[in-house]
Amino acid sequence: MNERPAMHFTGYNKARLEARPDRFFLACAILALSIALLMSAALATSTAFKKEWQFASEAKV
């Protein structure tokens, strides 16, 4: 009688421990994609500003 709840909790803990790395890797993947998106946006903004300044300086000359 006492073995049944112990097996239940053992199975629960085992499943929880097996699921933890998946969540960790998912969090890392989301973080990496977020950083890549921010870097891409920053690069696009930087390029747009450089072109804007280039056109502005050519207009003055």
Image (tube, rainbow, N blue to C red):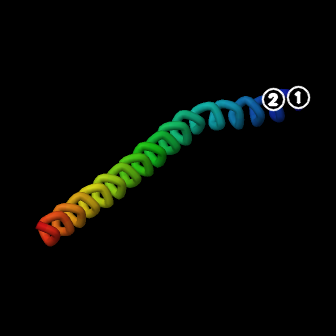
User: Which residue of the protein is positioned furthest toward the bottom in this rendering?
Assistant: 59
Three-letter code, disc 2: Ala
Side (left or right) of 43 relative to 1: left
Q: Give the x, y percent position of residue 40.
A: 32, 53
State the image coordinates of residue 50 (x, y, percent, origin top left).
Answer: 23, 58
- The residue that appears at 42% across and 46% down in the rendered structure is 35
Amino acid marked by disc 1: Asn
Residue at screen point 28% across, 59% down: 44
Which residue is depicted at the point 11% across and 66% down? 61
- Estimate the spatial distance between the alpha carbons at disc 1 and disc 2, rounded to whole Å: 7 Å
- Count of number-bearing discs: 2
Image coordinates for residue 24, horizontal then vertical, percent: 54, 37
Classify residue 23 by image quadrant: top right
Residue carrying label 2: 6
Q: Position of residue 20 (x, y in %)?
A: 59, 36
Give the quadrant of the N terminus: top right
Mark closer to the observer (1, 2): 2
Choose between 18 and 30: the one closer to the eye: 30
User: Which residue reaches farthest right?
Assistant: 1
Residue highlighted by disc 1: 2
Task: Tell me, yes or no, whether the two marked residues, 1 and 2, touch with CB atoms within 8 Å.
Answer: yes
Question: 57 or 21, which lies in front?
Answer: 57
Query: Residue at 70% across / 32% down in the picture?
Result: 13
For disc 2, the neighbor class at 10 Å (few under 14, some 14 to 19, many from 20) is few
Viewer-proximal residue among 32 and 13: 32
Does residue 40 appear left or right of residue 25 in this picture? left
Taking depth in this image into account, of 26 and 1 the one nearest to the observer is: 26
Q: Is residue 16 above or below residue 33?
A: above
**Element type at mark 1:** loop
Judge left or right: residue 30 versus residue 48: right
Q: Secondary structure at mark 2?
A: helix
Q: Which mark is residue 31?
A: none
